[in-house]
Amino acid sequence: MKFIIKIIYKLVYQTNYRNFIAIFLFRLNLIPDEYKDRVRAMLKSKQYEKKFLKLNLSYDELGFYYLDPMPSKDFLKDYYEETYWHNRNDKFDLIYGSHSLEHVQNIKETIKKFNEISHENTIFFLKCQMNLIEEKFHLHILIILLENFFIIVLKNMIIVKL
């Protein structure tokens, strides 16, 4: 009996078998609701994998490989929405950004997204140009962040000035 339990344990904890079982249960509508999005993404991922495998991997003289023909923007958008981004419900322990916040178009929407993907102990490591009001405003910088912004918006943070 122990031998059978060991075999079942090994089968269940191997990714391919686990995924097969999850997809099988999903198709029979027997998977718990909390896992449905993740299994749906797994199933879609398998469908997209078949499409990716039809593409060739070509070499360029500049020293890189690329898919040939290159997938369209719509194909890639659908792929990430159906297999990755939409189905991730993880919270991150660390959010890192380097000189990117000052370039976002809608800082309030970005803050909302930070709140969705972070938890109370998330560490934010955000490197930004701050307090540049006295300097000339550059076209590529859309907003100027002040130290108060970080104190108000991100409560659990340490400000390090370099």
Image (cartoon, rainbow, N blue to C red):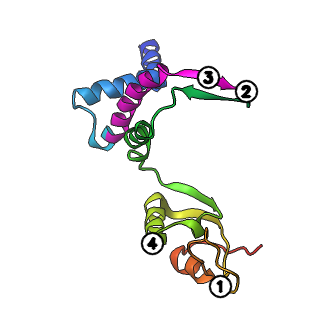
Q: Residue at x 47, y 58 (%)?
A: 117
Is the residue 88 above or below the residue 51 in the image?
below
Residue designated by label 3: 58
Secondary structure under the numbered disc 4 in the rendered image:
helix
The kind of residue tagged 1 is Ile
43 magenta-colored: yes
Q: Position of residue 126 (x, y in %)?
A: 63, 66
Assess disc 1: are there few (<14), some (14-19) or many (≥20) residues with their C-alpha within 10 Å of its C-alpha: few
Q: Nearer the viewer, mark 2 or mark 1?
A: 2
Ranked by sequence position, the earlier of labels 1 and 4 is 4
Q: Which of 129 and 56 is in front in this view?
A: 56
Q: Do the residues labelled 1 and 4 touch (CB within 8 Å)?
A: no
Instruction: For marks 3 and 1, give the one nearer the viewer.
Output: 3
| Badge 2 vs badge 3, beta-carbon distance below 8 Å | no
What are the residue bounds of the magenta stretch?
Answer: 37-61
- Single out the mark in the foreground, 2 or 4: 2
Which residue is under mark 2? Answer: 61
**Residue with the most extreme left position:** 29
Secondary structure of residue under mark 3: strand
Magenta span has 122?
no
Q: Residue 108 carries which label?
A: 4
Could you tell whether 86 is left or right of 162 in the image?
left
Type of amino acid at the residue the image marks with label 4: Lys
Q: Mark 1 points at which residue?
A: 133
Label whose residue precedes the other's in the sequence (3 or 1): 3
Q: In which quarter of the image is the N terminus?
A: top left
Which mark identifies residue 37?
none
Question: Residue 157 location in percent, x, y?
Answer: 61, 72
Regarding mark 2 in the picture, which secondary structure is present there? loop
Query: Which residue occupies 47% across, 18% down?
Result: 6
Residue 156 against residue 31 in the figure, above or below: below
